[in-house]
Image: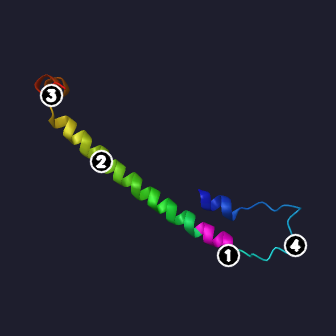
Amino acid sequence: MFRDVLKNEPESNNKDNEDNTGGSDIQWLIKRVDLLENALDDVHKKCDIVIARLDAIRVKLPSNYAEQNLKDNPS
């Protein structure tokens, strides 16, 4: 998503002709964004695993587990 925005940089009329930074800065940014997107994908996968595990635990617990726990261990 972000990579596409960086690659499709609009041309501006007031761009400095002596700008000699080249595409190296843009390429570096694209690589960093790719790494961040990969890390975000990994986090999403881990969150999905945690949610699935919590759902599995919830199925195994009795429906009134929270109420029972509060009665047995009042704060």
Q: CA distance from mark 1 to mark 2?
A: 39 Å
Does the magenta stretch mainly form a helix, a strand or a loop? helix
Q: Earlier in the sequence, mark 3 or mark 4?
A: 4
Quadrant in the rendering for residue 69: top left
Report whether 35 appears left or right of 68. right
Q: Which residue was labeled with disc 1? A: 24
Q: Nearer the viewer, mark 3 or mark 1?
A: 3
**Above/below status of 30 relative to 71:** below
Q: CA distance from mark 4 to mark 2?
A: 52 Å
**Secondary structure category for the residue under label 4:** loop
Q: Which residue was labeled with disc 2? A: 50
User: For the view shown, which residue lies furthest in the left direction?
Assistant: 72
- Tell me if label 3 and label 4 are in contact, CB under 8 Å: no
Q: Earlier in the sequence, mark 4 or mark 2?
A: 4
Taking depth in this image into account, of 5 and 67 the one nearest to the observer is 67
Taking the magenta stretch, the answer to whether it contains residue 74 is: no
Question: Which amino acid does the dot numbered 4 rest on?
Answer: Asn
Q: Which residue was labeled with disc 4? A: 17
